[in-house]
Structures are given as C-alpha cells and as structure tokens.
Image (cartoon, rainbow, N blue to C red):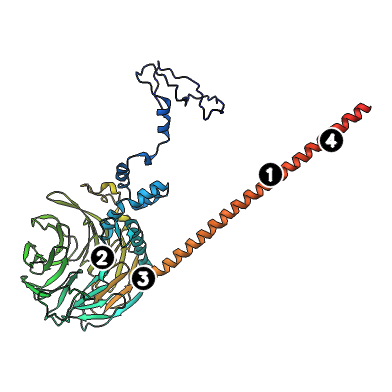
C-alpha cells in the first residue's frame, strides 16, 4: 500500500519483520512496516494510529473476499468469453462463474428459452447447467461451415410458397400453390401427414407446440390445436373432437405472413393491415393499418415489426401506437423480415437483392433505428430471411441461399444492455464481411427459408422441399474435438513424466557430485598429511 507523507510526517526507516521466533531480523533499505502485533506506525499529523497487522493483510486480499452478491454483480458485466477466462483463475472463481445467472441471460438473448420438459427455475434444464447448455449450443452453431448432406422432400405438386421449421418437436411444415399443408419428420425427411385441400394458395405457416396456423389468399386463417397424446402433435386430416380445428375470417385480402407468441396470433395481409388475435378466444384485439401491402412481420415481447411496401414499421401491440418507421429501407418492396431474440436487431431483405441489418433502440413511447450493415449477395429479389444466432440465411429468386455470420456485429459489451444507447452505431459498414457461405445448384425462385440448430429448410418454384443437414459436420467436429483432447492429455502426461525424470536425474547428479567432492576432500587431506610428515622428517 502507498501512503502520502507530508513534510512533517515521520515514518521509521527500518523495521524488523519476524516470520517466527527463530527468524533473524532483516534490514530493508526502503521504508517498510513492522509486522509485530504490538508495535504501531506513528504518524504525527494523524489522530489515528493504525496497527500494522490491520494494514498489511489488505494488500493480499482479492475479489473472492468481496460479498457474493457484489461478485455476482461484477460477473454480470462480463460476456461469455470473459467469464470463461475468469473461471480459469481459481477454483473459487470457477465455481462462481459457472453458477452465475449470466449464462442463462446470454443463452436466452441468443436462442431464447430452450423448450424442454424439465423445469428451468433452478437454472437446470435436462440435468444440465446453463453454462453447459450455452457451450453445447455455441459449439453446435459453428457447424454451418462444415460438411452437409441434402435431403429432397417430394410430395407437393406445385410451387412451395412457405416452410416452417419447428425444431423443438423435430417437425417441418410446408405449403404452397397446391393448397395442402404438409407435415414432415425433420430427422428422416419422411412425410407424416397432410391436410385436405384448403381451397386457395397458402402463403404463410406458423406453429409452436400448442398451435398450428396457415394463411390463405382467400383471407382466412386455418388453425389446428394440439391433440394430446399424438406424437406428431397435430391431426391435419381432421378430428372428431370439438375445437381442434378452426378458421378465422376478417382479412379482406390474401394473408402473406403469420406469427405466434404465448398469448397472441399475428397476421399480415395485402389488405394493408396487421391484425393481433387472442389465442384462446380467437378475437381480434388490434388492427394496425399501413399504407401499402404488408409482406412480412415478426413480433417480440410487446412490439411487432412489419414491412409494408418499401418501409419497415415497429408497433406497440398494447396501445397500437407506431414507435418508429424506417422509410425506403429497400429500392422496391421489402419482402422479408427477421429479428434477433432480444428484439434489438432487425434483418430485412428486399426486391433490390440487398440485405440490411438495423438496430432498434426502444424508449418509453418511441424508438430509434440505426443501420448497422448491408450485404448484396444476390442478383435477384430476396424473398425470405431467417435468423438463428449467429447465422442469417436468405433465399432469393436467383436460386441461391446465403449464410452470413453476424457474430462480430452482435458482439458488444454487456454493460450497455438495458441502456438507451446504440451499441453498434460506430460500426464501419465498409468493413463488414461478405457472406461466409453460398448454397446453390438448384432451380430459380426460392420463396421461403427457415433455419434450426443444424438444419436449413427451403422451398421454391420447383415444388420440392430441400433440407440441408449439418449434423454430419457436428459429429465430425465432435470426433476431432475428442482426438484433440486425447492428444493434449497424452502431451501433458509425457511432459509430467519428463519433469519427474529430469528431477530424478538431477538428484542423481547432485549425489554423484557430492560423493566426488567428499573423495576429493579426503584425498586432499591425505596428501596434506603426507606432506607434513615429510617436512617433519626433513
């Protein structure tokens, strides 16, 4: 510790620090403090006299001496990489960093709550901690640059306009011009069930584990509720049980987009409105009116983002007020829209073939938008975009899919979370990396795309559904990771053995040197005695 000493402050120059009763006093040139408990430091101008043993221990204190609540607040300001570094410092910090709730917060920010049967109240899910869940999901997200296989799903007789991947139930829902909603198994790619013809083109499908909805060009919403005990969740062919299947009529134009949350259904239409419905009563709660056809929408919490014409809107769903408008986001129509799980970032695709990324800063009654990045990977219109951290995937009329890693754009300090400031508005748009991967080799006019943990599903004008399976890359990476671990373990074992053998050889060398020195001393004594006897005789 450093003390500021004024002109009339006297500190003794030398003190004796005793480690034990047999230790000798050591003389130190620089001013030091006596560690004897009875002696004190004398300072003339200060009325307090602090014992030396109350000062020195403070020099050896660390963050682990702080109250646990304060340590938790400090760890909350760190990102996952920094938490991993902290956990390597000591066993105490490893335990605190591993149990910290920041892992749950970061997981939910990136991928939302995992849909598992185990409760999440204690921070455990399926007997895994939040840190383990985060590490596993982060590892899985890196496989989209690896090897893949393509499964082609046949069944539709005309173009496929919409696909939806329900990863939690391992199901895929598709529909299009043939007016039939089909359900597929995600693992083996087989068709499970199909609905009866609904009488018009189906341009939008949305689902969760409780409800499936499809929107038609005739302006209706067709819905199926879950059937308890049914492995595939929904009975698309029709059920004799009441209230399993329903249809809602209120839109006056074709329905182009649908979305669900826990309490509501969201629908967008070419009648220039977005309607918010109550899931239980199926009553319309809000009507959000636009100036042009509505192409896409995505809700988050109490807001919903929509695209109409070339503009992007953000609405408050409780009050129905407009929070912000991004005018002329694209040259031509803004066809597609995706959103991060935090709701802070929007991704748009348009008729000009460009993809834009915006950050939305929410205030109490308004919001502000900042353009973060722009990509132009396609030569045709971008009909669909989907986001699963950190990958943004787009489908275009040029018959190509682009994969964009936005990890670096989203990698911001967690200290700014919850504050009304932009975290990425200083990003240089000219330094944004191009798409990391382009998937092509099939026909033109891809209309819809969706992405899961290790799958990408796409449908288009060909009338088939293609599924890119990256689980093979995951298995290869797991094997490579295991081999790296084995090599590291063997390397550490060899190093430890080498250290032990080198210590043993050093001990042997020291013993041999000691013996040699003893023999040399004896010989010197013998020679000296012999020399003395010869001198005496002389």
- Closer to the chain start, of discs 4 and 3, is 3
Label 1, label 4: how many angstroms apart (C-alpha)? Answer: 24 Å
Labels 4, 3: front one = 4
Labels 1, 3: front one = 1
Q: Position of residue 452 (x, y in %)?
A: 28, 68
Residue at the disc numbered 2: 117
Secondary-structure class at tag 2: loop
- Closer to the chain start, of discs 1 and 2, is 2
Count neighbours of disc 3 (C-alpha within 10 A) and say few if under 14, some if 14 to 19, many if 20 or more. some
Relative placement, left or right, of 49 versus 505 is left
Secondary-structure class at tag 1: helix
- Closer to the chain start, of discs 2 and 3, is 2
Q: Is residue 422 above or below residue 453?
A: above
Labels 2, 3: front one = 2
Secondary-structure class at tag 4: helix
Label 1, label 3: how many angstroms apart (C-alpha)? Answer: 58 Å
For the C terminus, give its image quadrant: top right
Secondary-structure class at tag 3: helix
Q: Which residue: 29% across, 43% down?
A: 69
Q: Is residue 55 visible?
A: yes
The count of marks equals 4
Label 2, label 4: how many angstroms apart (C-alpha)? Answer: 89 Å
Q: Which residue: 42% across, 49% down?
A: 88
State the image quarter where residue 49 is shown. top left
Picture disc at residue 510: 1
Q: Is residue 433 visible?
A: no
For the N terminus, give its image quadrant: top left
Q: Nearer the viewer, residue 405 or 246?
A: 246
Count neighbours of disc 2 (C-alpha within 10 A) and say few if under 14, some if 14 to 19, many if 20 or more. few
Picture disc at residue 471: 3
State the image quarter where residue 325 is shown. bottom left
């Amino acid at each position: 510790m450093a003390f500021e000493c004024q002109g009339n402050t006297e500190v003794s120059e030398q003190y004796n620090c005793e480690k034990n009763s047999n230790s000798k006093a050591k003389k130190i040139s620089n001013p030091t403090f006596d560690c004897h408990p009875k002696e004190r430091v004398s300072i003339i101008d200060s009325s307090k006299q602090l014992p030396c043993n109350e000062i020195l221990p403070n020099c050896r204190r660390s963050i682990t001496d702080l109250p646990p609540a304060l340590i938790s607040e400090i760890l909350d300001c760190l990102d996952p990489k920094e938490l991993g570094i902290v956990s390597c410092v000591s066993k105490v910090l490893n335990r605190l960093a591993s149990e910290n709730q920041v892992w749950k917060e970061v997981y939910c920010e990136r991928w939302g709550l995992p849909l598992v049967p185990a409760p999440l109240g204690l921070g455990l899910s399926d007997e895994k901690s939040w840190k383990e869940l985060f590490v596993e999901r982060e590892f899985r997200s890196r496989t989209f640059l690896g090897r893949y296989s393509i499964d082609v799903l046949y069944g539709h007789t005309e173009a496929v306009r919409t696909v939806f991947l329900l990863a939690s139930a391992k199901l895929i829902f598709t529909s299009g011009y043939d007016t039939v909603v089909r359900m597929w198994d995600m693992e083996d790619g087989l068709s499970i069930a199909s609905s009866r013809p609904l009488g018009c083109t189906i341009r939008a499908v949305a689902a969760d584990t409780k409800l499936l909805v499809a929107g038609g060009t005739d302006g209706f919403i067709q819905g199926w509720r879950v059937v308890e005990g049914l492995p595939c969740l929904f009975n698309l062919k029709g059920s004799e049980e009441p209230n399993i299947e329903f249809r809602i009529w209120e839109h006056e134009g074709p329905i182009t987009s649908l979305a669900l949350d826990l309490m509501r259904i969201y629908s967008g239409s070419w009648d220039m409105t977005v309607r918010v419905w109550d899931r239980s009563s199926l009553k319309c709660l809000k009507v959000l009116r636009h100036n042009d056809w509505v192409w896409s929408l995505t809700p988050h919490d109490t807001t919903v983002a929509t695209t109409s014409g070339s503009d992007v809107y953000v609405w408050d769903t409780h009050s129905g007020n407009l929070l912000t408008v991004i005018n002329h986001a694209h040259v031509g129509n803004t066809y597609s829209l995706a959103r991060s799980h935090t709701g802070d970032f929007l991704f748009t695709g348009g008729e000009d073939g460009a993809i834009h990324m915006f950050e939305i800063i929410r205030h109490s009654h308004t919001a502000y938008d900042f353009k973060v990045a722009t990509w132009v990977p396609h030569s045709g219109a971008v009909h669909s975009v989907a986001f699963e951290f950190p990958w943004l995937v787009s489908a275009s009329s040029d018959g190509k899919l682009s994969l964009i890693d936005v990890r670096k754009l989203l990698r911001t300090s967690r200290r700014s979370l919850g504050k009304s400031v932009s975290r990425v508005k200083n990003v240089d748009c000219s330094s944004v990396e191009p798409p990391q991967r382009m998937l092509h080799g099939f026909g033109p006019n891809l209309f819809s795309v969706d992405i899961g943990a290790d799958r990408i599903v796409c449908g288009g004008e060909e009338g088939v559904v293609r599924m890119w399976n990256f689980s093979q890359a995951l298995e290869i990476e797991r094997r490579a990771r295991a081999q790296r671990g084995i090599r590291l373990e063997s390397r550490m074992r060899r190093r430890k053995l080498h250290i032990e053998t080198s210590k043993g050889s050093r001990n042997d060398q020291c013993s041999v040197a000691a013996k040699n020195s003893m023999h040399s001393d004896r010989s010197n004594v013998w020679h000296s005695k012999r020399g003395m006897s010869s001198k005496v005789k002389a």
